[in-house]
Image: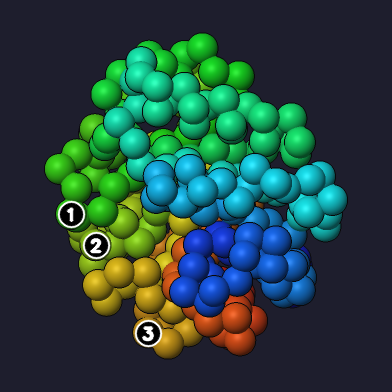
Amino acid sequence: MEKLANIRLGFSTGCLYKSGLNLIQCLDLLRSTSCRVVELGFVKFKDFLDGEFKNLTAQDFRDFDYVSFHAPVLNYGFNSETRDVFNWLSILNLIRPLDLIVFHPDTVEDFSIFLTQNFPFAFENMDKRKKSFKLPKSIQLLTLMFRNFKMVLDVNHAYTNDPSTALTVEFYEKLGDKVVQIHLSGYTGYHEPLFQNKQAEIIKSIQDTSVPIIVEGVLKPEELVLERNYILETLAGA
């Protein structure tokens, strides 16, 4: 029980993208699971532009101890789209200081654009569909550019590249001290619920449960607690 008490588990709002709920309804529903960790998921640039998050107030984040933001996939560099994203993230960061902003590194055109930003950011490892940043050696190159480099370890992405979970082990061996957040979901082709797939090996590949764990599996509202319980029970027995 002590081990469970120290696990910081929560969901991405993207888990509920098929539910038809708006962002505030998603936050209310995720709050009802008693999870105090949440990620605002805006991976698609179109969803970011639609900008439901732009109407959020500090009250909408009540009861959440940790809030991260998954930034949209974009060709980040010295362009107007990047400026728009960074400006809005800075505004949101004033409403509720974000604990982390997550970026996909494979579409970044110029990493130096991040050197002048004041918000906390991290890059995550990519899945097998991508051409780069799938392996520790490519992620390690970023540590040479950023003095305080931070990484989000997506164990689903690592699993797509190596179902034996040996790749996840390698990430921990080479970059474990840089991992500040976990992305977790099942995998049979996308981001499936773990409680359905029973892919305990993906959950057990998480070596450090002291960092926030964000669940990204696509779920129905009534499945949130089932997913939460399965993950916690698996971690407790790991």
Q: What x and y, as percent, mark residue 52?
A: 61, 51
Q: Which mark is residue 160?
A: 2
What colour scheme has been applied to the protein in the rendered image?
Answer: rainbow
* SS at mark 2 in the image: helix
The mark lying in front, picked from 2 and 1, is 1
Residue lying at the far left in this picture: please name it: 131
Which residue corresponds to mark 1?
A: 129
Please state the horizontal and vertical placement of residue 48, each as a whole percent of the image: 49, 45
Q: Quadrant of residue 23?
A: bottom right
Verify CB contact (< 8 Å) between mark 2 and mark 1: yes
- Considering only order in the chain, which callout, 1 or 2, is on the residue closer to the N terminus? 1
Vertical placement of residue 29 versus 127, above or below: below
- Tell me if residue 94 comes above or below residue 191 in the rendering: above
Q: In this view, does 33 lie above or below 7?
A: below
The numbered mark, 2 or 3, whose residue comes first in the sequence reads 2
Q: Is mark 3 on a helix, strand or loop?
A: helix
Q: Mark 3 points at which residue?
A: 197
Across and down, in percent, residue 84 comes to 49, 27
The amino acid sitting under disc 3 is Asn
Q: Is residue 97 visible?
A: yes
Q: Earlier in the sequence, mark 3 or mark 1?
A: 1
Q: In this view, does 228 lie to the left or right of 156?
A: right
Q: Is residue 182 shown to the viewer in this render?
A: no
Distance of mark 3 from mark 1, alpha carbons?
Answer: 21 Å
Question: Residue visible at 59% across and 32% down?
Answer: 89
> Is the residue under label 1 in contact with that under label 3 (CB below 8 Å)?
no
Q: Distance between the residues labelled 2 and 1?
A: 9 Å
Q: How many labels does the image show?
A: 3
